[in-house]
Image (cartoon, coloured by chain):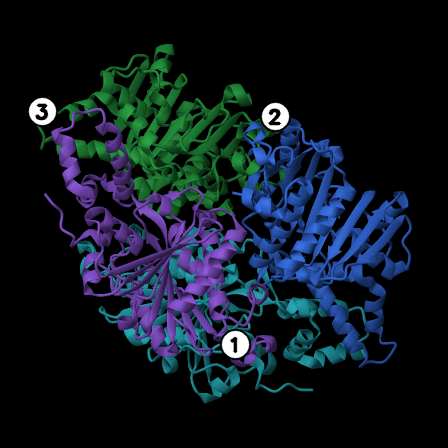
Chain colours: A green, B purple, C cyan, D blue
Amino acid sequence: MKRTVSIPNYYTDLALETCEQLQSESGELNGVEVTSEEHESHGITVTWVRIADETGVKAMGKPIGNYITLESPSMKESDPQAHEEISKIIARKLGILHPLRDDACILVVGLGNWQVTPDALGPQVCERMLVTRHLHEAMPRELQGRVRSVSALRPGVMGLTGIETAEIIMGVAKRIRPDLIIAIDALAARKTSRINATIQISDTGINPGAGLGNKRAPINRETVGVPVIAIGVPTVVDAATLVNDTMDHMLRALRQSVSQDDAFINMLDEMGNEERYELIKGVLDPDAGNMFVTPKEVDAVIGRLAHVIASALNIALHPGITAKDVNRYLN
Amino acid sequence: MKRTVSIPNYYTDLALETCEQLQSESGELNGVEVTSEEHESHGITVTWVRIADETGVKAMGKPIGNYITLESPSMKESDPQAHEEISKIIARKLGILHPLRDDACILVVGLGNWQVTPDALGPQVCERMLVTRHLHEAMPRELQGRVRSVSALRPGVMGLTGIETAEIIMGVAKRIRPDLIIAIDALAARKTSRINATIQISDTGINPGAGLGNKRAPINRETVGVPVIAIGVPTVVDAATLVNDTMDHMLRALRQSVSQDDAFINMLDEMGNEERYELIKGVLDPDAGNMFVTPKEVDAVIGRLAHVIASALNIALHPGITAKDVNRYLN
Amino acid sequence: MKRTVSIPNYYTDLALETCEQLQSESGELNGVEVTSEEHESHGITVTWVRIADETGVKAMGKPIGNYITLESPSMKESDPQAHEEISKIIARKLGILHPLRDDACILVVGLGNWQVTPDALGPQVCERMLVTRHLHEAMPRELQGRVRSVSALRPGVMGLTGIETAEIIMGVAKRIRPDLIIAIDALAARKTSRINATIQISDTGINPGAGLGNKRAPINRETVGVPVIAIGVPTVVDAATLVNDTMDHMLRALRQSVSQDDAFINMLDEMGNEERYELIKGVLDPDAGNMFVTPKEVDAVIGRLAHVIASALNIALHPGITAKDVNRYLN
Amino acid sequence: MKRTVSIPNYYTDLALETCEQLQSESGELNGVEVTSEEHESHGITVTWVRIADETGVKAMGKPIGNYITLESPSMKESDPQAHEEISKIIARKLGILHPLRDDACILVVGLGNWQVTPDALGPQVCERMLVTRHLHEAMPRELQGRVRSVSALRPGVMGLTGIETAEIIMGVAKRIRPDLIIAIDALAARKTSRINATIQISDTGINPGAGLGNKRAPINRETVGVPVIAIGVPTVVDAATLVNDTMDHMLRALRQSVSQDDAFINMLDEMGNEERYELIKGVLDPDAGNMFVTPKEVDAVIGRLAHVIASALNIALHPGITAKDVNRYLN
């Protein structure tokens, strides 16, 4: 009944959670480097996961590359100071992850469905971007030479367009030839505590099997012909995750009451987290399969997160102007 | 470890579910009459629960009165024919539950928060009502004598107003003196299959301990001085309910694998549904406590349900005009 | 063909515009005191109009009382610094206009239709208020004694509720007995340059004949039994105003080309502004009568104005806490 | 002071209005065929304008091709019967204008800004389309062979994306290779009575100088390499049009009062409509330049128009299924 390592990774979009899972199972991580830093203010932690080689790829089930995770409980609060700090950290990390020439053209892609709040993060970031590509000569004189060429696309979701999102991006990228694509997406996490409190930045693009269970073509350098930075925030957990997490707590609580070698408890213990998750998915009420779990105040939180990420991008992409300027030029 | 019957009923807004729970526990229902009818089309079932006396009140934990539940899986689909049929059935039941004089004045109250989709049912029904109270002399001649005086109020929720919803309704009712209040609300159910697929109509008003865990003052004839019909649809389940339901399925599946008198299984069995639910609530991740579980397409579904209920009310309250007319005179 | 003074005032909600009109006609203003101050930053002008006696009432067509107008073109821009300054000025003026005891209870009323963007200012202010009335004992310890009791009501508009807005407010005020009502409303102005660039604060309440042509009962101390401060922003001009203003410019431009005593020009000149306005209203395409004129970016602008006013109120009503705190406690 | 015919046509998107203007000026129309039909029900008129040759192109300022205009005051009312009738007429006209093979692939493009209500028609049509391109094998069996391959794109507007809309469409069209593009857009008209009461269908694509004054690249067979049907509804008039129309009425009314050969009146008469329009634009308050004129109930009306057009397209593109089916398969 021992589980193999071949399937662990499909169930979380966060490389950090895959690391935690692997370490809890086998205590080691080959081919993966993990470093982390604590910031003094606002409880911000940054973890940098680097998948270095094929061993890491196999263990993690994710492509070679960098996965930076920024966590802070203040992210979901109404805390402008913390959010400003987080935006600045993201901007700095982006600069390290993918340095840009002054004349680079960047296409920001807001993935997701703007009509479903927890999936609207990407589109909402686009709305807050200082878009400049079309201004060229019309650029206000005081901005010339201080902003990069930035465009923003909301491709929609396949259920509404009938078109693979990757195809739309490829088509547009082929015409406007950006130097870099930055794709924003809502993710799924495995810990409810991470919902709306975590931002992952990765230089490996968006890869299939993503959070909300929507099958889709990858969006990365191979498919769209341009480097792709992905920025994601887990905004939902699925019903099975919630059940599994809760059952875990519950078993721990109940275990005390029964004898040490209870056959049932042993069985559940042997099963391992992942197998139990699959079991839960199997018995889940079919109506629940179509459901998601999200905080009550999701509208306000998604708006704030979109602001944090858009600010980070505006700072990183338009280094010659201040946040104040950005506000002024955003309609 | 036997559970008493004193607390079972607070956890579902649906009298029908309380009945089911009591019958599954003790096999009998004193002081409660249940009759049900199957409609041939669209899989519609109507169940009429009447709490007749104090025995029923004690068992059910709900006031004396009538609770009509209409169920149909077509309710959450895009199925205009089924919806029209459901609207007509609701209109008929309302006529039986509370016959109205021709010159009656009715105040429709849309409870809930219009900014949180699963809680926006009441406000959305108000938007679709044919409101006539202010027209009096200005009434288009062809409508005179064919429509009743109807007004519609969206009082908001206490977290946003700082005022008990019941107080707002009392204040307004005291001024405009309606003959009947019809209050629309989103409820919580215990079965995920009932979400957005069930409508409950009751002549007992809205009572505390309601679904989304918002404590509030009751809205009924005692508090507002006017008969109150409540119409509710379960639009969410809470996280603990989802976990409990799923664990139930899971235990049943696992039980086969272990010996008959496993101490742990016995313990869980003895616990009973409600106790287990409380245990789950206790161990639930605090972040999950603030979460709700809702179908992905909740926006579209709430809109359709609001249309079904508003149509039913427009038919019931304005008997002299057809659905076609209503459409014409709505905004 | 001389116009009388009996009707001039019904066509603008801004006392300041009535003053301008009267001065341009007769050069004098009896019974009215006007003082104004220029602020150095952000082009902010504050004008204080006081209607002192019945002569003023007759001339202005508005009740005795104070009308403070704050104007700044920065109001409609995305300019957080200017907006913060404006919020502080409003907060100060409110303190002068109506000093409050520490234990005063305030009811903020957001008038208007939240579904029609230019009319949604009031409801949007309510959404941004730090509402505290319901917290009483549950108040976070650090806020105790630092915030006043504030509640917020969005009564809706009569077309949607069937109830006079004044009646809803009276009913609620009678129950919760506030010491002061602050009513927020969208207004109509006569100059397109004032749209979304002007805030009027008055201690005379809301009076009939208001901007968007909606007849309604007054909301003032007489009707609701409590002092009423009205805060309004002109968000639309009507079609006739736009035509009239433009024709005025045009006639001035064309006049040069024709002889001094052209009969037609003389006729238009003699007519006076108001008479011409009425003439235009008369010949206006009936389809245009139902139309309003509003800036393209009205959604963003209304959101910013709501933020400015809500900040002002949060500062004025909760003096023991900072803007930072307000952000923290607003979900 | 006689005006030339070289510039008349830039100011309305409706070929029908250009015809009316030309006929009112010169009484004749060379190179243009106009036929019209009255429908008995719902006051529906259909006018078919065909620009046949270069003479027509020159006179009309629009490309060779067909421009079908459907007018009905019922369009802006809540009148489901009339709307169903209009949808069917549009579907029929589309079939005549551009017959489709059974296996044709169609890309529907919803132009405009979904955040500005009068410009949101295109995006809202997309939301109501039965999109099928991605279903292929996954197609419910009962739909196979009865629906065409339809996809739907909302490219956004250049101010928000930084990309010419035509470029986005070209990029996507190059990848998914549709046989036909149908582009939906909000237009500007010259008569307020036509606002939201007129639909124009054309086989010439979308051409520059369009209504809301947004310069943009044409979207037609030449630019995107695929035939383009454009469907447009005038949803706004600009401020100058409103002023001009009203002044026209007014001058007519005033003219009676002055002598026959008044110099001023003569001057205005000689000017002609277009010159006066330009003059008005010149003197228009700069703040008004950024304003648009739209009916108060624009939200509801745009939603209904989107429904009318989407129904027409669903009928025309998926001939094997009924309106009822469409409702069932739409989310």
Residue, disc 3: A260
Mark 3 vs mark 2, CA separation in Å:
63 Å
Q: Which chain carries label 3?
A: A
Residue C150, x across and y down, in percent: 29, 65
Taking D3 as reference, is A116 left or right?
left
Query: Which residue type carries mark 2?
Result: Lys
Q: Is mark 3 on a helix, strand or loop?
A: loop
Q: In which quadrant of the rendered view does residue A292 lie?
A: top left
Crowd class of label 2 (few under 14; some 14 to 19; many from 20; radius 10 Å):
some
Q: In which quadrant of the rendered view does residue D227 lie?
A: top right
Quarter of the picture containing the N terminus of chain D is bottom right
Residue, disc 1: B135
Q: Closer to the N terminus: mark 3 or mark 2?
A: 2
Query: Which residue type carries mark 1?
Result: Leu
Residue, disc 2: A174
Q: Are marks 1 and 3 on the same chain?
A: no
